[in-house]
Amino acid sequence: MGSDETEKVRQLPIGVFDSGVGGLTVVREIMRQIPNERIIYFGDTARVPYGSKSRETVTKYARQIVRFLKSCHVKAIVIACNTASSFALDQIEQESDIPVLGVVKPGVKTAVAATKNKKIGVIATEGTISSQIYTKYIQAVHPEMEILGKACPLFVPLVEEGLLEDPVTDEIAERYLGGLKDLGIDTLILGCTHYPLIRGTIGRVMGESVTLVNPAYETALALKQLLDEQHLLCETKPGLGDNKYRFFVSDGADKFQHFANSIFKYGILSAKQINIEEY
Ligand code: DGL
């Protein structure tokens, strides 16, 4: 590749996706850690939640989204969804000619570094918990560590509805997390990208002695390293009006845009609805 062409590839966007708004917690970190990068985000709002669906269905959805993102000429893909990472990352990696990154391995790395008593809790969707992926990854390297998983299926709809600080969310968090708290874990992985948006509630229930791990930070760091290794980091700052960040959804673009604007410091330009079934 000539140097002009290499420069063009570096300026291509990174594709990021999730079932809905959860992946925005990863986007937020990517924006912070590698601010030169352009991003194309897809939230599958018509088909959320993924957490209660089968491996086959989630893999089919993930493949469609990868095809859509590739049609936008992305240079790398981040699966900003634990459920899709648990079920489909290996397959998508095998099929892809561009780098693909999930959120599970980065989360594991942070949790292993954080725990002192070797008892780690994982809260996630039913799909992620039943896949046992966190237990497998952690115990492959640290068989002495105890991993205690708990599925929290109502957290995703609560977040999608914007009930981030709400008595209903407090009540559900108490029910889900009360038992986990008594098991003596000192570290809790927020194993669903929606959960950092209710981190305040989760932290209040778990108490100060439990370290909460948000895999988003380590994911953005891993992405930066990966792009750097592959000489894909964008070195120039995109100009204003350069479509730096673009957001797509499969339904409810206005609702998504409103939500995204409430969690980012500055407004996003717009969110556009597409028909993902066409991909
Ligand atoms: N945010 C996703 C995850 O990390 C998906 C949640 C869902 O759609 O159930 O698992």
Image (cartoon, helix red, strand yellow):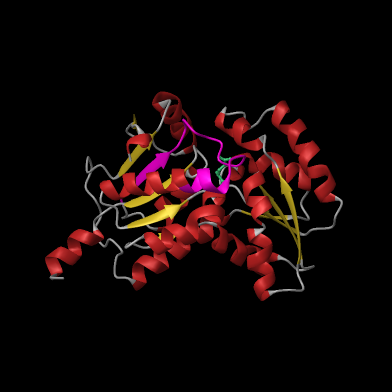
Q: Nearer the viewer, residue 36 or 50?
A: 50
**Position in image of residue 54 (x %, y %):** 58, 44
| Image region (quadrant) for ligand 1 | top right
**206 above or below 268?**
below
Give residue 119's quadrant in the image.
bottom right
**98 above or below 153?**
below
Magenta range is 38-59
**Position in image of residue 27 (x %, y %):** 44, 48
Is 153 placed left or right of 279 in the picture? right
**255 above or below 212?**
above
Residue 50 part of the magenta-drawn span: yes
**Position in image of residue 68 (x %, y %):** 32, 44
**2 above or below 17?**
below
Whether residue 190 can be seen here = no
Q: Residue at x 51, y 43 (%)?
A: 57
Q: Residue at x 52, y 41 (%)?
A: 22
Quadrant where the image shows the C terminus: top left
Residue 199 part of the magenta-drawn span: no
Give residue 53's quadrant in the image.
top right
Farthest-out residue, front? 56
